[in-house]
Amino acid sequence: MSIKLFDSELKVMDVLWKHGDKTAKEISDILNAEIHWNMNTTYTVIKKCIAKGAILRSEPNFMCHSLISKEEVRAAEADELISKLFDGSPDLLFASLLGSNKLTDEQIEHLKKLVSELDRSGLK
């Protein structure tokens, strides 16, 4: 994915990912209720997402449809983070998470399970 989304754009995309296709007005209403954005702010950010190719606009009613999935954005952001801060090494990111002492026992068990499943699937 070559689309770089900023935090404000991710807020708009998150509405589409959670709720599916929405009109710009509906997105504006949701973001107004959640984070107190006014209509002009929301429409400006929607237009930026359209220009970047993240949203498809159709008529009637300025209908917005996500062209990229949350999983695609997560993967691209994770790759960028690993590249920028961990010398391209996912294991350094993982070690940093484990060494931060901010993970709960439940989160650690979940990570162990994910690694075990990855190991069993042969995707290592």
Image (tube, grey):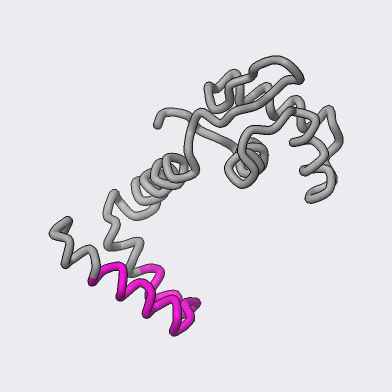
> Residue 9, percent across and down?
63, 36
Residues in magenta, as a range = 96-116
> Residue 8, percent across and down?
67, 39
Left or right: 123, with 6 as reference point: left
Name the outermost residue toward the bottom: 105
Quarter in which the N terminus is drawn: top left
Q: Relative to 104, is 45 above or below?
A: above
Quarter in which the C terminus is drawn: bottom left
Snapshot quadrant of residue 99: bottom left
Snapshot quadrant of residue 24: top right
Front residue (pair 67, 60): 60
Q: Is residue 51 visible?
A: yes
Left or right: 58, with 122 as reference point: right
Q: Relative to 94, is 46 above or below?
A: above
Q: At 27% across and 62% down in the image, what residue appears?
A: 91
Snapshot quadrant of residue 117: bottom left
> Residue 52, percent across and down?
55, 22
Is residue 22 a member of the stretch shown in magenta? no
Front residue (pair 105, 26): 26
Left or right: 109, with 88 as reference point: right
Name the outermost residue toward the front: 60
